[in-house]
Image (spheres, helix red, strand yellow):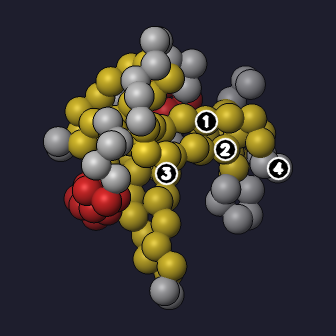
Amino acid sequence: MGIRLTDEARAHLERQLQRQPDAVGVRFGVKEAGCSGMRYVVQMAQVVEPGDVLLDEQGIRLIVAASSLPYLDGTEVDLVTEGLARTLRFHNPHAVASCGCGESFAVGGR
């Protein structure tokens, strides 16, 4: 399954990677934080760590820690424009709840 990028998200991440030529890909992950329990983490990756899972999504190299993959598998990432702000929005089939600001989420049974 993996992670799916919409065309808008793919184009956005491609532009970000072009601005950082030392990056080897885009790291997606989760960490415990926020009012709902977990928070998404997105950053340009400088290295591939042991235990990382490499995914290719429409030519974009996605790097996911094996521990984060169960929370992200099947997620669609979109780029949303609200006024002057653009943000990545996650449509995660594992999320059973999210906070009002959309920054954190909860998964069933965890």
Separation of disc 2 and disc 1 at Cα? Answer: 5 Å
Looking at the image, is 10 positioned above or below residue 30?
A: below
**Label 1 sits on residue:** 30
**Label 2 sits on residue:** 39
Q: Residues within 10 Å of mark 3 (few under 14, many from 20)?
A: many
Question: Where, by quadrant of the figure, is residue 108 drawn?
Answer: top right
Question: Which is more N-terminal, label 4 or label 3?
Answer: 4
**Label 4 sits on residue:** 35
- Asked if residue 19 lies left or right of residue 82, the reply is left
**Label 3 sits on residue:** 90
Residue 73 in view here? no
Depth check: 56 or 106 in front? 56
Separation of disc 3 and disc 1 at Cα? Answer: 12 Å
Numbered circles on residues, count: 4
Q: Viewer-nearest of labels 3 and 2?
A: 2
Kindly identify the residue that appears in the image at 54 percent across and 35 percent down: 29
SS class, disc 3:
strand
Separation of disc 3 and disc 2 at Cα? Answer: 11 Å
Kindly identify the residue that appears in the image at 24 percent across and 42 percent down: 60
Kindly identify the residue that appears in the image at 18 percent across and 43 percent down: 58
Separation of disc 1 and disc 4 at Cα? Answer: 14 Å
SS class, disc 1:
strand
Depth check: 20 or 108 in front? 20
SS class, disc 4:
loop
Question: Residue 10's mark?
Answer: none
SS class, disc 2:
strand
Q: Residues within 10 Å of mark 1 (few under 14, many from 20)?
A: some
Separation of disc 2 and disc 4 at Cα? Answer: 9 Å
